[in-house]
Image (tube, rainbow, N blue to C red):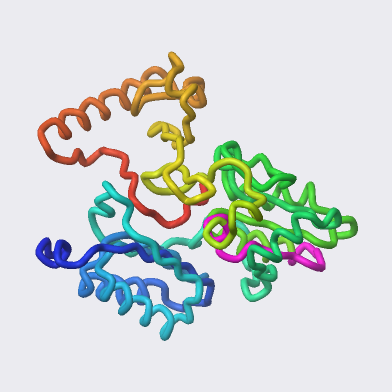
Amino acid sequence: MMNNEMSHAMPLRVLAFYHFLVLDDPEAERERLHDLGQRLELLGTILVASEGLNGTVVGREDSLQTLQQHLTEKYGVKSLKWSDLASGNEGFHRFKVRVKPEIVSFGVAGLDMTQTGEHVDAERWNALLQDPDVLVIDTRNTYEIGIGSFDGAISPETQSFREFPAWAEQHIDPGKHQRVAMFCTGGIRCEKASAYVRAQGVSSVYQLDGGILQYLEDTDEAQSRWQGECFVFDQRVSVTPALTQGKYRQCYACRRPLATADLQSDDFEHGVSCPHCIGETSEGRRSQFRERQRQVNLAESAGRRHIGERQRSPSVERND
């Protein structure tokens, strides 16, 4: 449990990271990282698998610097992203390190993660977007793409990242598509997707370094090719091209982003349903959601947090 005196004395920050490497004993690494996180009084989640690490944690800056040093020296982690804890966001409620089959769910065994796409910066990315010989693919899910993307990018129309390999096999022809560029929110999904596309025989594969969020941070509005908002996996739901709070809210039943028109629909019921998922759940299931939301409301009115409440904290980049 984080010491309240310490947390008030020094502002909390967020550190997100991922790295693909071979871990022979994920459980042993889990124990080491858990013990370190406890000592540093961190909150958040770290995923460990035989293929590497993926995590987002909240803590004092000095604690996060110690963690960063450990991640860099022991595992060679290079993809690290610092950010400030958003106003009004209390962060995670606990610290956990979990062993998973994959750090980003893809469903393809045996990928050589040393053979990923070439990382390109924002300036190079803009040039690729303008090249008619480059196939540009948005590797995110349909509900993310629906609120914003790069002009001209192809959507694989996936509901889960695990659907991407089948789509790529059907729609990417190495004989025809010799140059492929891809992007995602923070970069981790493109690592897997680019390794898969290269393994299928595409000669030149590129990926946007740091993902959409890094692009928006590095690019002036006048040079930006981004259109719309960017879905994010935290309490903000979406961000504008200037990385300010977006206009979307989220349906806690299906996690899809909701525009103003969705919130005004008769099918929207906070915590229960929205126009996108009203036909996907039974009345019995919606009754369960409705009871959960009632308990959340009661807990909030009593000044406490209900254990069943959907948490909108910073999180590892979701892939489902």
- Pinpoint residue 52: horizontal percent, then vertical percent: 49, 71
Which residue lies at the image location 55% right of the left edge and 64% below the top edge?
210
Camera sees residue 187: no
**Residue 145, above or below 268:** below
Q: Is residue 183 left or right of residue 62?
A: right
| Pick the front one: 1 or 7 | 7
Residue at (41%, 72%) from the top-left corner? Answer: 26
Furthest toward the bottom, the residue is: 73
Location of residue 117 by image quarter:
bottom right
| Extreme residue in the front direction | 222
Residue displayed at 16% across by 28% down: 298
User: Does residue 226 show up magenta in the picture?
Assistant: no
Part of the protein shown in magenta: 198-215
Does 124 appear above or below 225?
Answer: below
Relative image position of residue 92 (x, y in whole percent):
27, 54
**Residue 123 in which image quadrant:** bottom right
